Image (cartoon, rainbow, N blue to C red):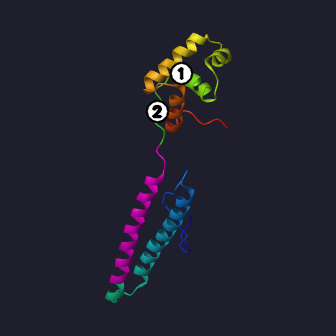
Amino acid sequence: MRARGLGKPSQTPRCAGGLREAGGLLDGLLDTLDLLVAQARAYERALPPDNYPARAAVAALGELARQALNEARDLAASLEPPPPAPHPFSPRELQVLGLAAEGLTNKEIAYRLGLSERTVQFHMNSVFNKTGTGSRTEAVALALRSGWILPAT
């Protein structure tokens, strides 16, 4: 994004992800504050050195705009979703959990992966132990919330 009339790209991070409406409003605020800070700097340079009242007013406005911009950037950063935590599973456990999330039974998972049904049950028990859950539904729900697996499309 370029600040109007100044030809400089903005260095302000933008909102991404799930909070689109709030992110859109916040992006507009960040653009406006970027522009205000840039214009305050331009006015400071353009004012005559002996016009102390005007220079003091513009300097105060510029400082307030910089403070507001910093707070808006902090808010934008806090709205971004945190990266998913690393999962505690082996590759096979993650594969079994992903298939369980698709609604497959242990028998269907075993057939699809070329494993015994008992091996699939072993992997599911390992998932339960690592997540502290007591059922497939709980384990899948936790994995979806944590970003370890993606919802089926």
**SS class of the residue under badge 1?**
helix
**Dot 2: few (<14), some (14–19), or many (≥20) neighbours within 10 Å?**
few
Q: Which residue is mark 2?
A: 86
Q: Amino acid at mark 1?
A: Glu
Residue range corresponding to the magenta coloring: 56-82
* Quarter of the figure with the C terminus: top right
Quarter occupied by residue 62: bottom left
70 versus 47 height, above or below: above
**Dot 1: few (<14), some (14–19), or many (≥20) neighbours within 10 Å?**
some
| Contact check, label 2 and label 1, Cβ < 8 Å | no
Residue at 51% from the left image edge and 38% from the top image edge: 145
**SS class of the residue under badge 2?**
loop
Mark number displayed over residue 93: 1
17 versus 60 height, above or below: above
Instruction: From the top left corner, tell me how far across and down residue 114 is, in percent.
Output: 65, 13
* Quarter of the figure with the N terminus: bottom right
Q: Is residue 110 magenta-colored? A: no
Image check: 149 left or right of 60? Answer: right
Q: Main secondary structure of the magenta part?
A: helix
